[in-house]
Structure formats: C-alpha cells, structure tokens
Amino acid sequence: MRGRRRAARDPALLAAVVVVWALLALFIVYPLGRLVVRTFTDGGHLTLGNVLAILGDPHHRQAFWNSLLLGALVGICGTALGFLFALTAARANLSRGWVTLLDAATLLPLVSPPFTTAIAMIFSFGPRGLITYGLLGLKGVTVYGLASTLFSETLTYFPIAYLTLKPILAGIDPNVEDMAQSLGASRWRVFRTVTLPLAVPGFANAFLLLFTASLADFATPLILAGNSFPVLPTQAYLQITGLFDLGGGAVLSFLLLVPALAVYLLQRYWVSRRSYVTVTGKVGAQTTVKTVAPWLRWPLLGGCLAVAVAILYFYALLFYASIVVALGANHAWTWRHYQVIFTDGLKAIGDTLIIAGVGMPLGGCYAILLGYLVARKAFPGRHLMEMVSMLNYALPGTIVGIAYLVAFNDPPLALTGGALIIVACYVFRYSPTGIRATVALLQQIDPSIEEASAGLGARSATTFRRITVPLIVPAFFAALGVVFIRSMTAISATIFLVSIGWTLITVRILENMTELALGPAAAFSVLVVVVVFAVIALISLGLRRWRVPGAADFSSIFGG
Amino acid sequence: MRLDRRSYAGTLLLLLLALALGWPPPPAMAQTLNAYSIWPENWARPMLQEFEKATGIKVNFVRFSSGEALARLIAEKGNPRVDVLFGGPVETFAAGIKEGIFQSYKPASFGALPARFKHADGQWVAIADDPLVFMSNTKFLTEHTLKPPASWEDLLHPAYKNMLQMADARTSGTAVTRIFSILEVNGRDEGKAFDYMKKKRRNVQLYTKSGGGGTLPVGLGQAGAGIFFIVDALDTKAKGYDVTISFPREGIGTSAEAIALLNGAKNPEAGKKLIDWAASPAMQSLYAKYKINFVPAHPEVPVEASLAEVLKGARIFPIDDGYAGANRKRLVERWINEVLNPKE
C-alpha cells in the first residue's frame, strides 16, 4: 500500500515502471505465452498429453538430472576459479601489469563464440588428440562426456564469476579489514569472518549466473557431451530441429525453468537476510589492502597463470587453424580463409556489427533502470518484475528463439526478417547480467546517500541521475559489455531469427563447421575476438574521461 | 563525475540514425528471389550465381541445416519469408508436405525425370542424387591391419570399438538413409536390422548432429570410420585428409536432393524459373565444373569421370519412398529407444 502511494506521488517512477513493464510484457511475457499456448494445446484443445509423453520417458528424466548436475558443477567450479582470479586481482596488491594480463586472459573465453573452446577440445583430447595422444601418448581416450563438457563450460563461463566477484572484493573498504586486524585477528580469521562474508552476495550471483548459463548452453554439450551424457537444452534443440516437435522441445525446456527459478529464489533469500554495506558516504582514511599475506601472492598468481596458459593454448590453436590450409591435413600457410570471410562473409560481419552496436546502449540503459527500480524503489510487483526480467536468460536460447519466431511472425507484430527482433532478443536475453550487477552493487551502497539527496528536495529522477548513476557506472558498463559481447558471440536463440536480410557471424561459424570449412570458421572466430577487444579498448578509453574512483580501469567495463 | 546530457542526446540521435538506415531491409526489386538453402554455401553460392547470370534474377539466400530450415518454414507458415527451399535430402521435403508448406510445381523437365526423382504432384523435384559410402581413416586401417570395410558386418570388428562416428537419426537425413539401407540389406526384417544396429552401437563413439559431422574426426584420426554421403566424403578427401572410401557388397542406399516452391511464395514466378533451371541439365551439368560430387538427377547429364570411377562396381539402391514415408517416424523412435539409448 505504502509503495503504491509513493509511486502515485512520483510521476517519474510511475512512468519508468510502466515503460519497463510494457517492454517486459512485449518481449518476454508475450512470446513465451504464445509458446505455452502452443505447448499445451493440440488443435485448439487444452491438453497435457505433450507434457506427460515427455515426462514418461526415462531418457528425458535422465537428461534433466544431468543438466542439474552439470549446472551445479559448473557453478561451483566456475565460482571457485572466478574467486581465485578476483582475489588475486583485487586483494593481492599486484602491479597493474599483472592485473591487466589476468583481465586479458579471462576476456578471451567471454569474447568468442562458446563452441570454439569445444572445437579446440576435440582437437586436443581424444584418441588422436594433440595433448592426449601427441603429447602424452595415451590411447583409447574418449573426449565425449561429463568431464570434458564440465571443463569446457567452466573455462568458458568462469570469467562471468570473476567479473561479478572482482568489483565486490575491490569494493570492500580495506579499513574494515584493518579494524579487524588491529583488534588482534589473524589474516586468515579476517579473511574468513570479514572478507568472505562480504563477498557472499557475489558468490550467490556468480553461482546463479553460471548455473543458468550452463543450463541454457546447448552448443558445448552438443559437441562434447556425446551420447552417454544427454542434457536438456541439447535434447530440446534436437527435439525441435530434428524431430520437428516444437511442443516436445518446449516442454523439455520448461522443465529447465524449475531449477533456474529454485536457485534464483534461494539466492534471493540468502542475500536479503544480511546487510553488506561497506561503501557509505563517510570516507575513511586511505589504507593499503592487507587481505593476502605477501608470501601467498605468488602461489595465487601462479594458479591464475596456469589457467591463463590453458586458455591461451586453446585460442592459439584456433588462430593456427585460421592460417593453415586444412588443420590436421595440410599445414601450409594461407590467408585464403580471411579472404573468404571478407568477401562472402562481409554481409554477416556488417550486420553483426550494426546489431551489436545498437543493442549495446539499449541493453545498458535497460539494465541499470530495471536494476535500480528493483533494488531501490518500493512499488507493487517489483519482485515479479525482477523474476520476469530473468526469464529469457534462464530459458535455453532455442526456446526463446522459437518463441520469438512464433510470436513475431504475423501482423500486427511482424518483426521477423528484420534487425529489431535480433536486437530485442539480445537486449532482453543478456541484460540480466547487468541487472544483477546493478542490484549487487546497490546492495553495497548505503541508501542514506540517496535519501540525503531526496531530503534536500531532489526529485527521484534527479537523484537517480546525479547520485545513483555515477555510483553504478561499473554496472552500466557491465551491461553494455555483456550485451555487446553476446551480440557478437551468442547463437542459440538468434539462429532462428537470422533472415535473408540480416545474418550473424556466429551462425556463419556454426554453418562453416558443419560444412567442414574449419578454416573460415576459425578466421571468423579470430575476427570476433579482435573486434570485441578493439571495442572494449575504445570504451575503456572513453570511460577514462569520466573517471570515477575505482571504476575507470580497463577491467571494470564488464565488472559489477 | 559529470554526466553530460548533451553527449547522451547525441548518442541517442546517432542510434536513431543507425536504425533509420539499417531497417527495415531494403524493398525487394522487381526480379529478386529469396531462398533457404540446405546445401552448404560453398556449393549453393556458385549455383545461384550462375542462375543470376543466366536469368538476371537476383537470389538472396541463407543456408540452414535441414532440421533448422524445416523448423523455420513451419514457424513461418502464415507469412513465408522465402520462395524456394533449395537442396536437402528428400525426406525433409516429405516431412514438409505433411505440414503443408509447399505448393505443387512441375518444371519443364518433370516428364524426363525417373519416378523416384519427383513427387507425383510436383510438391518437390530432385536436382541430384547422393549415395552413402563407408569412409575410413587410412592410417587407422593400416595401424590395425584392416582392409577398408567391404561389408556391413566389417563394421562390427572389435578394432572399431568406440571408433565409429555417424549421424544421429533425430537430426540427420544421412542417418535416416543409413537406417533404411540397413533395413533393405536385411530384407526389411526389422528384428534382424535392429540386432545389427545394436551390435554396431558398441563401436560407435558418437552420433553427430549433422550428416557430415563425423567427417572431420575421421579425417583427423579421432575416429576410425563412419558412414557418410558421398559428397561429404569426397570433400574430406579433397581437403587433403587421408581417407579411404569403400562400399559394402550387400549394397547401400542413396537419397535424392530436392527443390520445392513454398506455399504463399511472394515471388512465385521467379521461384518457378529457379526450379525449371535447377531441375534441368542447365544447372546439373555445372556440378563437375565446381567440383560438387553429387550425382546428377537428370538422366541426360553424364556423371563426372572421377566420380563415376569411385562409384564403379558399387551396389547402390534407392530407398523406397512410400515405405520410408510410412515407417520413418516409427523406426526413428525405435532407433532412439533401442539403439541410441539402450536399456541396459
């Protein structure tokens, strides 16, 4: 009740809520609704037959448990690895050069299509793999299964955990740790009882993001899981594209919503019970970070570097594949593959850049607006708003893509065939990273700063613009970065949305791979990596002009 | 920190400009044609460029695998975005007929085509024929002192344990053609055929999503052998991978590649011209020039010499259309339950 009255008194808030709800309704609720109708009806009649048929199959049930297992393992391993990197980068007093190196290494998996690591895995492991056979001389090794899928997904997604945890660790005021130390606590005790608990919202966020990323990933298991470890997104994809069973595929992917929502609610409950405010309006004296003992710095760095070397190896292999005639058969140097992508593939490159360039700022604005509303404002249905905003991210892309196709093919909303539908898909599917970043960051900032602004007579729009926005700039750039990167690299949803008029690099990569044109596929991947790095560098340069304490370095572009 | 309102407004304006320039897609010119191609781009592109040269009709196309193309066409049924589905195994077209996505068109060479290369009502016509082959890694064969597999039974040899790759019947026309081949060589005795497939399952390392998915692993030696369409196998060889192609003496199936006009096509006349052209010797005699190893469907086009050499002595039989159409769904489901996911 109080919320509703406040909303009515504040026209800016009311307008923002209405606009956000309209967008959510149009681009998330409506397409999924159309898909549900399609799932639960058969020739105009309501039926449960589709669902029961799927649930009755033990193979599908196995796929469901496999997905949970994989998601949980990727969540745990990825968060642990991300924490190692974040701790090393943010709390170990390393020189700027080392931190930049770690940032660059973790960026690689983020800035390339997810299945590129999977392809490099196929070359490296297996009966004739470069590593298992060429280096170690092992025979009869199989590359397909849980272990390699887990390895590949962890390596691909842990940077998300790193980027979520790093600003949170960096944001912990060293004075807090100092106080604990001066009260006689050992470094380990301070770490355990002060630093770690302060990072809890970050852990929960990172785990959630990785869990859902793994749940939704169909490309990696498609290539690596083999036939003994089926997972739901791949099954759903095969059900739709292989058996032409849209209903069955829809049911399979709706099963994924259950664990995704459960983890999400758990995380909410866990985070909301505690207060994590360490950045307040009151500024303490400057002090150095003493979280990590000096001797521990080098083992930590060593661990990170080992992972970085593994990542670099995969991408070096990819680069090599792009400059030889045919990897594994003819290793003569050639630029032919690059010629091919810059002639036949030029349209895909241009289209992708336009779509990513348009989606990026839209996604950034949408993410901080929604994150801010949810974290700071009281209005009816805000929890529902956050949940709805997560839907397109939690659902496998295949389903989102098919839902968009079903919903937006006919007038009055005939968007298929254009660029808008691809942009909308990316914005509403990949902004949740920015939304979560905004929420997590705002939980660390004392509301009293904003209350002071309001107390001095500023309207909520003014407070948002003058006080909140500068504080959540890192989250804005996280949203910007993730939407841009995903626009350049994602495939599962948009493979259904590309058209005669608009096509995407990632779709061309997958096509090239199935056409056995590994060279152009590798060349396209290298191009994606280079473009994304260049854009990041540009944003970073621009960001330096609006320097914010602790927010203006290279890495914070995705941080939050 | 200063947030400059004007720079934001400027950015927004630029964005709007980009949108205005970028969308919607430019209006169609008088003589254009839109198509989904199931053939890989490196084969579809030269063919469609030759068509442009011959007729002046501009063709816009995107390539999708057969499953993806069909899923899209079904979803776009009410408002089709393309006029023609170009290339792809015939059973994709059979599945499309059930969804009512095509319209009948009988091109000029309809009468000249043998019965198995056309749908009786002209819902599709064939533009090529594509037999299956066994493809093995030559080094793998010598290391295990094996001869190239010359019988379906040879693939059950323990040396192949966990070393075969072939397509998944859920997604791939290649796999469906393979299953019907096995049924044919077993006299359509389903019990015998499935016994064989279950035995072979032990040697299978991976069932791949696309029909050609296993060619690269076999080429690299990550897998020992597999069953593929001849175009994919010869393409692997042409890339420089050391592979051996062989045929089973019991015989192996072949699948027609087809073309069809979509129901509700926006440029039906241009679409019909493409079908006329593709079903005639005008296009099919170009396969040799562009090193596309399909067998021409039109009886007047000779098979290219080196392809004919590979096919010499091979026992190849067509898959019976009616039998395959009537039993496909049931047999694929049985394959999923008994072969792909055996109950141990």
Image (cartoon, coloured by chain):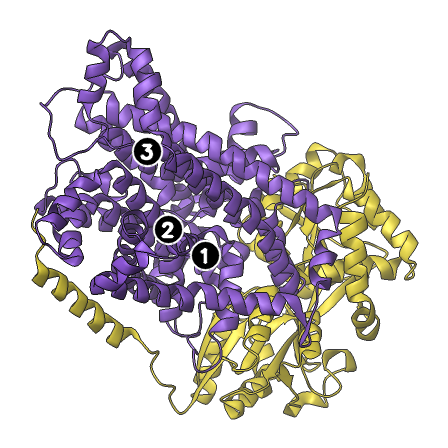
Chain colours: A purple, B yellow
Q: Are marks 2 and 1 in contact (CB under 8 Å)?
A: yes
Q: Which residue is mark 3?
A: A165
* Element marked by disc 2: helix
Q: Nearer the viewer, residue B8 or A52?
A: A52
* Element marked by disc 3: helix
Say if B197 sits above or below A168 in the image. Answer: below
- Left or right relative to A368: residue A394: right
Q: CA distance from mark 2 to mark 1?
A: 9 Å
The chain holding disc 1 is: A
Q: CA distance from mark 2 to mark 3?
A: 16 Å
Residue A483 in the image, given as x and y percentages of width and height = 33, 54
Residue lying at 31% horizontally and 76% vertically, measured from the top left:
B23
Q: Nearer the viewer, residue A275 or A322?
A: A275
Please tell me how crowded label 3 is: few (under 14), some (14-19), or many (20+) other residues with Cα within 10 Å.
many
Residue A301 in the image, given as x and y percentages of width and height = 31, 20
Which mark, residue A392? 1
Which mark, residue A432? 2
Q: Quadrant of residue B6?
A: bottom left
Say what amino acid the circle numbered 2 marks.
Pro
Say what amino acid the circle numbered 1 marks.
Asn
The chain holding disc 2 is: A
